[in-house]
Amino acid sequence: MTQAIIALAGNPNVGKSTVFNALTGARQHVGNWPGKTVEKKEGTWTYRGKSYTVVDLPGTYSLAAYSMEEIIARDFIIDARPDAVVVVVDAANLERNLYLVLQIIEMGVPVVVALNMTDIATTKGLRINTEKLAQGLGIAVVPMVAREEEGIDTLGDAIVAALDTKQEILQ
Ligand SMILES: Nc1nc2c(ncn2[C@@H]2O[C@H](COP(=O)(O)OP(=O)(O)O)[C@@H](O)[C@H]2O)c(=O)[nH]1
Ligand SMILES: [Mg+2]
């Protein structure tokens, strides 16, 4: 059986690479997207005895397909049909980040939100009702401080649950 593919999406500077590194450690391969000068990072994430391929998509604010980064991210989700997409969002700039989350949900792939930078949000006095947000979006939302590896295991469980849900639907 081929490994499930998990794509990481998010606005620039939200901690996407930090999440990628926390999941894959040293098991990474860095190249370029075919025919493009944009860097492509792929890694292996092993969790509870199973291995998954993790692809770090270019940082984008949307998937409107205006920039090369947006086209790469959009085409990857459409063509490779990842088994799940983790959208890393900046909790301190939630509204701006949710635009991309909604666009990816609309593409019909299983999505998990990694609500990162919650330490900065707290410092700014922002309090996010994670459960309400998850209910509103209809998907899992995992609060994280990726730089401290806080929330990584909970994110792992949420990804596995999203993959299981997908299998149930396809049965
Ligand atoms: N305060 C804080 N900083 C973080 C967190 N996660 C990542 N960072 C930092 O944010 C910066 C951008 O992270 P990076 O992973 O390169 O973001 P990317 O552009 O989305 O790939 C780096 O300096 C990280 O160390 C977090 O949860 N809290
Ligand atoms: Mg990055």
Image (tube, rainbow, N blue to C red):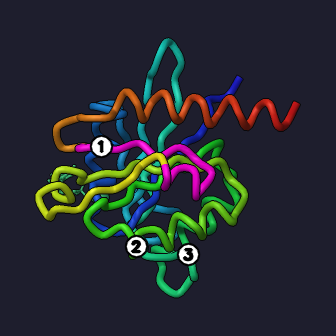
Q: Amino acid at mark 2?
A: Glu
Q: Residue at x 46, y 58 (%)?
A: 9
The residue segment tinted magenta is 132-145
Residue 93 versus residue 24 in the image, above or below: below
User: How packed is label 2: few (under 14 Cα within 10 Å), some, or many (20 or more)?
Assistant: few
| Image spot of residue 58 (x, y percent) | 41, 65
The kind of secondary structure element at disc 3 is: loop
Task: Give the CA distance from mark 1 to mark 2.
Answer: 17 Å
Camera-nearest residue between 139 and 29: 139
Name the front one of labels 1 and 3. 1
How busy is the neighbourhood of tag 3: few (under 14 within 10 Å), some, or many (20 plus)?
Answer: some
Q: Which residue ends up furthest to the left in the rendered image? A: 123
Quarter of the displayed picture in which ligand 1 can be seen = bottom left
- Indicate which disc, 1 or 3, sits on the residue closer to the N terminus: 3
Q: Secondary structure at mark 2?
A: helix
Labelled disc at residue 95: 2
In the image, which disc is placed on residue 152? none
